Image: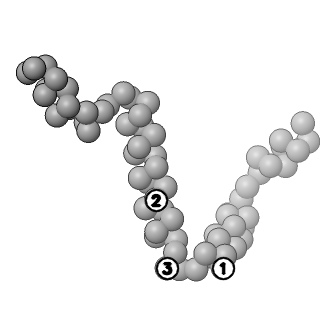
């Protein structure tokens, strides 16, 4: 229980330290690429969970015509 309380207290100073460490590890040029990849991954995940298969639409229409 004590670990949960300690982990739950993230203040502005801790966030700043985390951002500095990420910047040092990945560099300024790599971060936008990482965020783009993260966004694409989230989009794909949402699309998969919704069952939205836009890529399969032409295939379905072709099968229905036959």
The answer to whether 66 is drawn above or below residue 25 in the figure is: above
The residue drawn where x is 41% and y is 52% is: 40
Q: Where is residue 5 shown, x and y percent of the image?
A: 84, 43
Q: Quick one: SS at disc 1?
A: helix
Q: Is residue 17 visible?
A: yes
Q: Could you give the CA–CA distance between mark 2 and mark 3, rounded to whole angstroms?
A: 14 Å
14 vs 41, left or right, is: right
Q: Where is residue 25 shown, x and y percent of the image?
A: 66, 76
Q: Which residue corresponds to mark 1?
A: 24
The residue drawn where x is 91% and y is 42% is: 2
Q: Quick one: SS at disc 2?
A: helix
Q: CB under 8 Å between callouts 1 and 2? A: no
Q: Which badge, 1 or 2, is on the more N-terminal residue?
A: 1
In this picture the colour scheme is one colour
How packed mark 1 is, by other alpha carbons closer than 10 Å (few <14, some 14-19, many 20 or more), is few
Which residue is at the front of the view, 66 or 14? 66
Image quarter hosting the N terminus? top right
Q: Which residue corresponds to mark 2?
A: 37
Question: Which quarter of the picture shows residue 47?
Answer: top left
The answer to whether 7 is drawn above or below residue 63 in the figure is: below
Question: Which quarter of the picture shows residue 62?
Answer: top left
15 vs 61, left or right, is: right
33 vs 54, left or right, is: right
The residue drawn where x is 51% and y is 65% is: 34
Pick out the residue farthest to the left.
65
Q: Which badge, 1 or 3, is on the more N-terminal residue?
A: 1
Q: Is residue 16 visible?
A: no
Image quarter hosting the C terminus? top left
Question: Which quarter of the picture shows residue 12?
Answer: bottom right
State the count of labels. 3
């Amino acid at each position: 229980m004590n670990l949960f309380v300690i982990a739950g207290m993230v203040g502005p100073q801790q966030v700043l330290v985390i951002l500095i460490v990420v910047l040092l590890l990945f560099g300024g040029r790599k971060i936008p690429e990482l965020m783009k990849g993260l966004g694409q991954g989230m989009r794909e995940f949402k699309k998969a969970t919704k069952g939205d298969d836009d890529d399969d639409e032409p295939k379905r229409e072709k099968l229905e015509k036959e």
